Image: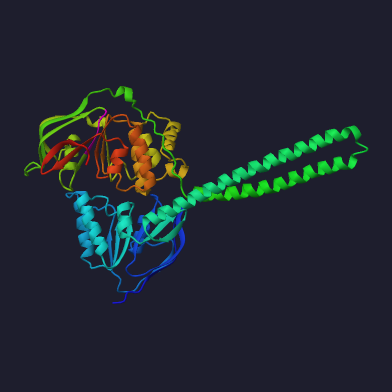
Amino acid sequence: MIHKPIQIKNLQLSFPHKTCFDDFTVQIPYGSRIAIIGRNGSGKTTLLKILNGMLEPTTGDIWCTDDVVFGFVPQIIEDLDALSGGQRLNKAVTEALSLEPNVLLLDEPTNHLDIRNKKSLMRMLQSYPGTLIVVSHDTELLRNCIDTLWHIDNGKIHVFSGNYDDYIRELRGRRASIEQELARLDRQKKDMHHNLMKEQTRAAKSKTKGEKSIHQRKWPTVVSNAKAGRAEETSGRKKSAIDHKKQDLTEQLSNLHLPEIIVPKFSLGSASIGDRTIVSISDGSVGYAEQKPLLQKISLSVGSRDRIAIQGDNASGKSTLIKAILDDASVIKSGNWHAPKISDIGYLDQHYGTLSAEKTVLETIADLLPNWTHIEVRRHLNDFLFRKNEEVNSLVAQLSGGEKARLSLAQIAARTPKLLILDEITNNLDLETRVHVIEVLKNYPGAMIVISHDADFLEEIGVNAYFKISDGYVLVPDDGN
């Protein structure tokens, strides 16, 4: 069967406070393998939903023939609470493929997968015969399963044919070229200023010398002054041209989005942390009612400055162990358990469960610390890059995944816990927000327990011990390999 291309014409997505993109026109040939990339909040997920017919664009049209069948897997999979993140994803992909789609739409599909399941998914995507359109920041997927990038950036969608590494090289090359041209213009402006100073100095010397015989040397003096005046006028025109060119280049450079820096201030200093054991488990077991223990013979000790990672396959019991430490009533546990009280534990999961959807960004922090003044709340939010009035007054429900991550971290910094538990928090983050999260966590003064399969992230935040869950046991720390 010959499949006709999907046509997109003059597509625009805008909200009262921003335009995500406009005037997007493109043709999608059958069998295309497209990744939509861009910063959190740029409109990637919404674009995927528009393609699936779940939402309407602000303006524009999408044409496809009647034989097009879409399969869609969302980023956050609801109504499967009994399953782990990886199990939810696998079930949702299976349901989508059961429709026999010829266009497969996936939103951050590798977020919840362990290494084994991720490789299995990528093999499936590589062999999938139809059109693939995926929102992802997973560089491994972008390198191996994609041949076209749609980059939502600065209100436009830029289409790049080629692989991810080629695109990043092009962006870096463009940035380096702009920076080199700005440096050249700076040198040119300094040279012009130096030459003008020399010309003015020569004119001044000529004028001084001519004052002794002004009548005899009147014309040469006028010539010298006129020459200096012409030099100054020419220099002024050239400087103005350089300034205009620099302004244009600086705008181009800013459009490449150099990440802003977060410098968090924690309410708890490292001096008050001390050196002591804050989590201690011996001969422990965990499970659920009317089931045999999921994990047994648990022996785990966490010091007040330790940073440990817990790893294992999907459904191996990682989240259950965390729930037990958090004293979740649904978990049956036995053995000897010692952990901080709940008010001294900060928990940050991939769904940002500490946030209330109906509150604003401002209310989220103000309600947490009612003794803070409005100025103190705004100053704290400013540290986490919530600066404009429309940003701090936005409802949590309207925030992107990356914005929710920053707000959750702002909560933790405002009332710093002695133990911080992180559950796959890098799943929904673009590369820029990931940098921000790492900056905050590097500065966090207390103990940390992290569930993550992201080796680079674990290394960057300073994890110093790795526990692996396998076959119902928590294995002793290894070197992280």
Measured as percent of width and height from the top left, residue 354 is found at 29, 40
How far from the left and from the top, in percent, is residue 302?
A: 21, 30
Q: What stretch is highlighted in magenta?
A: 305-309
**Nearer the observer, 460 or 61:** 460
Q: Residue at x 51, y 48 (%)?
A: 253
Q: Residue at x 34, y 66 (%)?
A: 32
> Which secondary structure is most common in the magenta stretch?
strand
Task: Say above or below: 210 vs 10.
Answer: above
| Quarter of the view holding residue 217 | top right
* Rendered image quadrant of residue 438: top left
Image quarter (top left, top right, bottom left or bottom right) of the N terminus: bottom left
**Residue 292 in the figure: left or right of residue 206:** left
Question: Residue at position x 23%, y 23% from top?
Answer: 276
Would residue 16 be seen by someone viewing this image from the given angle?
no
Residue at the bottom extreme?
1
Apparent side of residue 478 relative to residue 140 in the rendered image (left or right): left
- Total marks shown come to 0
Whether residue 357 is situated above or below residue 479 in the rendered picture: below
Nearer the observer, 426 or 459? 459
Residue positioned 21% across, 37% down in the render: 479
The quarter in which the C terminus is drawn is top left
Residue 170 lies in magenta, yes or no? no
Applied colour scheme: rainbow
Residue 305 lies, in percent from the top left, at: 27, 28
- Residue 230 appears in the rendering: yes
Quarter residue 73 falls in: bottom left
Residue 40, how many percent across, how many down? 38, 49
Query: Residue 57 versus residue 282: which sits nearer the camera?
Result: 282
